[in-house]
Structures are given as structure tokens and as C-alpha cells.
Image (tube, grey):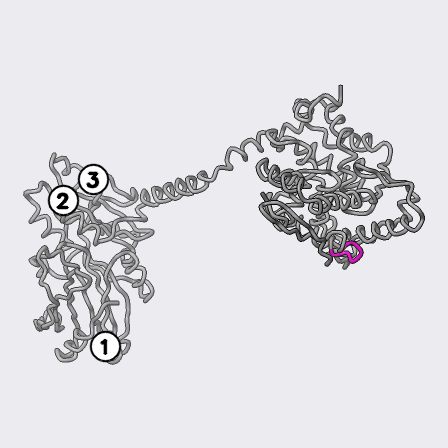
Amino acid sequence: MYTCKEISKLLDLYTDGELDEQRRLLAETHLQGCHLCSRLVRLREEEARLIRSDDPVPALSPGFTRQVMASLGPVMRSPAQGQWLFSLRKSLARPWLAPALAGLVLLAAVSYAASLHLITASPKQVALQNSQSGSQAQPQLTLPGSMTFSAEGGKAASDNSSLNKQELTGAVAPKTPADSGEADRVASSRNVTPVAQAISPTNATSPTVDGASDAQTPAAGSMPDTGTPVPPLLSLAPRQNSLEALEQQGYTVFQPGYLPSGYTFDHYSLLPGGSDSAQNTDPLTGKEHILLSYRNIMSGALLTLEIQALANPAPPPQIVSNANATGSQQTGANRIARQIQKLGHYFMLQVTGTISPDELQIVADSVSAY
Amino acid sequence: MEGHTPDHELVRQTLAGDIQAFEMIVERHQQTVYRILYRLLRNKQEAEDIAQEAFLRCYRHLGKYDQDRPFAPWLYQVATNLALSRLRHLVKHQSVSWDACDHRFSETQATETGWQTGLPTREGPSRSLDPAAAWEKREARSEIIQALRSLKPPDQLIIILRYFEELSYEEIAYVMQTRRNIVEVRLFRARQRLRNIPALQQEWGNAQCHHQDGGVTACTPVRK
């Protein structure tokens, strides 16, 4: 049975008839034995009566109905016209519907973007896929607005080595569609991106190899699928923040912490293979290289840092830190190559420049992840 | 016939194009809608205008009415939304405070225009009170009315719907587009404010009872 204190809290609900059956019975049991609580109930009822009794309302004007019906005249259309909208809205008012629709829209957007080659797998993902499939490297690199070319990159799995060799040089001679009828052809592809904005959209002689399973189909119909190999290209995108965009796409970028006097970052480019033929023999994946170029604003001399991801199945456990000054004299430039590890991935870094070997050594020593 | 046709049926007929059915709806609900609006707005003309607008909107948007729910609270919802918007507009553009919205109708006006009570009272005002008692009663009522009008319009609306129209908490929640427990809390607070009227405090105080062996032995009124 309720106590008086409990009843006092329930009095309003009781007099309003809002108590459930069980609590109402308990309250009535108490009220039968407690004349003061019963009196409080009567006071509540008196309170309600007082509130109700003395609130005069002027009479509604006669002819109100007529006025209302007359006002309907201008809008005398069937109200059922809005019913379908309400039914639709009601049917849409389901808690799971909004997330589901959002997911569908997102999926559609992603599919559309993928169809436009706006989104591709990152090099790491490609490397992973390649290592899992055991096939030759099929690097993809696509950035928004890229021009995509397609051509065949090889014949059969048995030709992988030569294929890789071709790819790594970036000197893949694309075959014509007529040449691509071999049953077991292995598609290899590469999209030269405008990162490498150095590639002119009108440069029909700079094809890449499309990695799609259907190597016959040029992704961009305006570009031929035959042409001269892609030369190592330098980008005309000098914006530093584009390096961030590169990072966001999964590329690991390194930068020298030290630059000789007068050198500033000029541009970067993505190379479809090694920067020279010597790279073809490297046990590399053929993944695109990143070539960062620094220019001496006074003399115009270039200092480059080439970054190449390695798909070494048995990478050395520790960073190889000994500089390997080769002293390449191809163009009177010196080169230092070294292997470096970052987050379990291995990279070949090559610093090349027409500066003294000692200074080049300092630059190479200062290279760290961007 | 009119009184026996349920609202849902009239709504259905209206949606089918029967304008007479909607006229019956207006006839059936106009007094209640008008009373609610008048008690909120305290102005006969405005109450009638907004009632008319409410029926107009009701007709326009009848297709949106969820026929799984009772019709009258939906109609009240349309009407009271208009009235509350009107009061907000007054507060915003005429520098009228919520509290000042109540002085728009005087007892003199009520006497002049004639008035009707909201719902038939259970007991009805006693006509056999002696003059002193009648004066006291009138004073108490005046205080109650003033206290009522000092509430914010949404709280006034809750009191109106509960006391005058005797809507359940659930129905009030539907009219006010809120939850039942919110209605319960707001009604409690509004009542607390009403019960702070000095003349009525002791009347509406609580009792303190003594219990022994599970039964009530004595109760003492608590005067605030």
C-alpha cells in the first residue's frame, strides 16, 4: 500500500486518470483508509473546478462555418492531391532508410569515380596484389584528370621477365590491337598521370599501358593505344602541396632535409620505370618512381631525388645506411643510391646532382620521410 | 446523422471530394478549436481568424493527416501551432512579453460580449453563497486566472488542453508534438506555479500521515 508521501506524488496523475490500473488500485486502497489524502483528492478536484469554472469565452460569431467554407473557395481542390506525398513521406520515414540510401549514393559515387579512373589502388595495394597473385607487377597510378592509354605489355607468363624489363625502363613499346590477340596475354598497365602534368594532353606519343583486364580498350578514346614509349618525364607541377596529394594516394615520399645553397623544390614527376637503363636490372617491382627535382635558382642546375618502392620478398631487416657513392658521370653528375626502410616497406633512393660528392652525401644523409 | 459519422469517415469522404463532409467536420470541431484559441490568444477576433485559417489549412493538408491517429488532436495541433506562432510574432514585433499576452481580454469585455464556459463543470458555480463568501471565491478565481495567464503560452496550452478540454497526456503530447513524459513534467511545473498563489497555498498543501501496522492512524494537514 502506498504511504501518504507516495500518494502525494501521485495525486495529480490519479486525479487526471493517468495512473495505470495497478497503481490506481493501490492508490484507492490508501485513499479509502486515509481521510486526509482523500480530502487532498477533493481539493485537487476543486482546484480543477475553479480553473474551469471562471474562464469566460465569448461566443463564436454566427456564420463561422459559412465563412470557413467560403474561404475554401480559392483552394477548392481535392486535399487528396497531397495524400500521395504524405504516403510517400510516411513510407520513407524509416530509421534504416536514410543510412541505406546514403550508402547507395556513396556506392554509386565510388563506382562512377572508379569508372572514370578517378580512384585506383594505391601502389602498396598493387604491390600486395601482385605479390599475392604471383604475377608480374601491374602498377597503376592514376590521378584525377589523368589521361589514360592502353596497350599490351607482354605475351605470356613465361615472358614476364622480359616484360618487366620493358616496363621498368618505361620503354614498353605498345602493341597495336592487332598484335594483342594472343590467348594468354598478360596485361600490364600503367597510367601516366598528370601529376605528371608534363605529359601534354595532346602528346599522343606518350602512351602508357592500361592494366585493366581488357587491355584492348583504351580508357580514353581520344588517345591512341600505340605510340612511342614514355620517356622519363619531368613534371610541370611545382606545387609543394601536390606532394601531400601524392602522400594521400599512398605513395611514400621522402625529402632531403638539407639542400645546397640556391636549390629549391621545383617539381616532381612519376616515372614509369627507372630513370636509366641500368635500373632495369634492379630487383624492383617496376612500380612508378617518384622523381623530386630541385633546381638551383641561380644556375638552373638540377638535383634530383628518385624514390622507388621495392617489392623485396626478403628485405633486409634493417635500414641500409651506407651510402653507395657511385660517382656516375653520365652527365657530369654524381649519384648516391641507398636503400631505406619505412614502416616495413623498402625504398631505393637515388640522389643525383651536379654537386660535389661530399655535399651530395650530406643531402643523401638528410633524406627522410616527407 | 452528422453526430454519428466518425471523424475518420468524414475525412475519407472529404478526401474523396465531398465538401459537405468537410463542412460537417467544421461544424463538429469549431467550438472546441475556437475555445482553445481564444484561451490562448485572449482576443475574440484573432481567435476566430486563426480558427478559420486552421480549418483552411486542415482542408489543404488533409492528405497529410495520418488516419491511424485520432483526428481532433491533429486539428488542434494545426490550430495551436498557428496561435503559438501568432503569439511569438507579437512578442517579437510588438515588444510584448509572454506575460503581457494575457491582458488582452478583460472581465468587462467578457461581461459585455457574453461568455460560455469551456466544458460543463461537474458541480457548477454555487449561487447560494453569501456575499462575503462569493467575494472570497471571486478573489480566489481572479488569482487563479492571473496565475494562469502568467504562464508561458505552451504551458498555458497544456493547462487548457488538460483542464478545459480534458485531453489525456498522450493526446496533449500529440497536439504539442512532444512526448508524454514531457507533457507530464510541464504540467507538473505549471501546476506548481498555479499552486503558489498565496490564498490557495494552504488549501493545496499536502498532508502528513502517520502509519502503524500498515494502516493510516492519523493525518495532519501541512500548511505551507
Q: Are marks 3 and 2 on the same chain?
A: yes
Look at discs 1 and 2 and give the one toward the viewer. 2
What residue is drawn where x is 56% and y is 31%? A87
Q: Output the chain of dot 1.
A: A
Quick one: B154 or A274, which is closer to the camera? B154
Q: Give yes or no for residue B222 being in the magenta stretch.
A: no
Q: Is residue A63 above or below residue A290?
A: above
What residue is drawn where x is 39% and y is 40%? A104
Q: Which residues are magenta?
A: B196-200
Quick one: A337 or A263, which is closer to the camera? A337
Q: Position of residue B12 (x, y in %)?
A: 65, 24
Quick check: can you spot residue A205? no
Dot 1 crowding, Cα within 10 Å, few <14, some 14–19, many 20+? some
Image side of residue A53 versus residue A36, left or right = right
Task: Report the residue marked by disc 1.
Answer: A258
What residue is drawn where x is 22% and y is 79%? A260
**Marks 1 and 3, how far apart in space?**
44 Å
Task: Report the residue marked by disc 2.
Answer: A133
Task: Report the residue marked by disc 3.
Answer: A213
**Marks 3 and 2, how far apart in space?**
14 Å
Three-letter amino acid code of the residue under disc 2: Ser
Q: Regarding mark 1 in the picture, which secondary structure is present there?
A: loop
Q: Regarding mark 3 in the picture, which secondary structure is present there?
A: loop
Dot 3 crowding, Cα within 10 Å, few <14, some 14–19, many 20+? few
Number of dots carrying numbers? 3
Three-letter amino acid code of the residue under disc 1: Tyr
Three-letter amino acid code of the residue under disc 3: Ser
Q: Regarding mark 2 in the picture, which secondary structure is present there?
A: helix
Q: Output the chain of dot 3.
A: A
Q: Position of residue A147 (x, y in %)?
A: 29, 49
